[in-house]
């Protein structure tokens, strides 16, 4: 176990890898791994509930941005994000890109310009997702809004960037809740996020 950004994580091995070595390993493996400054860290396996909510929110975002004057691209958890300043590559649960994706070193599996990032919380990752991972994401100049989604209660929270280093939190609770996603100019309906989820 090693301490990564304040959270104990178990690396794949104790070996230090280059980012290029990580990418070659990632191309051959069936499981997802994240890269933190030389260490390859397996991601936690997602449960059915986690996958349902991730799919629901990706679908809700896709529908909500359709028809807006600005073009937005909504992507799922298979899209890697590179944070060069921290030598880190991670997988979010969902993300939105404004206009066109910008690729890291021309690689279409890694983007560097997410506009909105979504993480579905789990017991093992919630402190990391709310804290250190959000701090990593804040290093991305393109990021305007960060959204976290609870699994076991209908609660969605958003941090919207008012200006550099200033983020404002809003929340919506209950399956009848509505969350304004200010960066996109849309409203997220929690009954869609938690469709077919029993509490």
Image (cartoon, grey):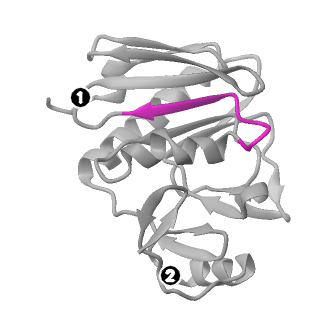
Q: Looking at the rendering, in which quadrant would you find the N terminus?
A: bottom left
Mark 2 nearby-residue class (10 Å; few <14, some 14–19, many ≥20): few
Q: Label 1 belongs to which residue?
A: 153
Which residue is more in the foreground, 104 or 39?
A: 39
Q: Residue at x 41, y 73 (%)?
A: 10
**Residue at the image position 33 percent from the left and 24 percent from the top:** 155
Inter-mark Cα distance, 1 to 2: 33 Å
To which quarter of the image does residue 22 belong?
A: bottom right
| Quadrant in the picture for residue 171 | top left
Q: Is 120 above or below relative to 9?
A: above
Query: Does the magenta run of residues contain 76?
Result: no
Label 1, residues with CA under 10 Å away: few <14, some 14-19, many ≥20: some
Image coordinates for residue 94, horizontal then vertical, percent:
53, 43
Q: Residue at x 34, y 49 (%)?
A: 51
Residue 26 at x, y = what percent?
Answer: 58, 77
Q: Which residues are magenta?
A: 139-149
Give the structural element (helix, strand or loop) at label 2. loop
Badge nearest the viewer, 1 or 2 = 1
- Circle nearer the N terminus (1, 2): 2
Q: Residue furthest right?
A: 105
Q: Which mark is residue 79?
A: none
| Residue 147 is covered by the magenta coloring | yes
Secondary element under disc 1, as helix, strand or loop, is: loop
Q: In the rendered view, tell whether residue 114 sits above or below residue 109.
A: above
Question: In the rendered view of the protein, which quadrant contains the C terminus?
Answer: top left
The residue where tag 2 is placed is 29
Horizontal side of residue 188 vs 87, given as left or right: left
Residue 74 is situated, as x and y percent measured from the top left of the image, at: 60, 38
* Residue drawn at 39 percent across, 33 percent down: 149
Please tell me which residue lies in front, 64 or 18.
Answer: 18
The spot of residue 34 in percent (x, y) is 55, 66
């Amino acid at each position: 176990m090693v301490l990564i950004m304040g959270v104990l994580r178990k690396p794949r091995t104790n070996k230090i890898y280059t980012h290029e070595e990580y990418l070659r390993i990632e191309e051959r493996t069936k499981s997802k791994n994240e890269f933190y400054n030389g260490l390859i860290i397996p991601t936690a396996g997602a449960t059915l509930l986690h996958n349902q909510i991730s799919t629901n929110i990706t679908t809700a975002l896709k529908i909500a941005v359709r028809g807006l004057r600005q073009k937005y691209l909504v992507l799922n958890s298979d899209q890697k994000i590179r944070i060069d300043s921290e030598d880190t590559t991670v997988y979010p649960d969902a993300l939105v890109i404004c206009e066109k994706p910008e690729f890291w070193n021309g690689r279409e599996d890694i983007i560097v310009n997410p506009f909105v990032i979504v993480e579905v919380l789990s017991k093992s990752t919630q402190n990391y997702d709310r804290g250190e991972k959000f701090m990593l994401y804040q290093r991305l100049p393109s990021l305007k809004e960060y959204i976290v989604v609870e699994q076991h209660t209908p609660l969605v929270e958003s941090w919207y960037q008012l200006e550099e280093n200033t983020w404002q939190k809003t929340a919506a609770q209950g399956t009848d809740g509505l969350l304004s996603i200010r960066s996109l100019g849309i409203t997220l309906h929690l009954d869609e996020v938690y469709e077919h989820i029993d509490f």
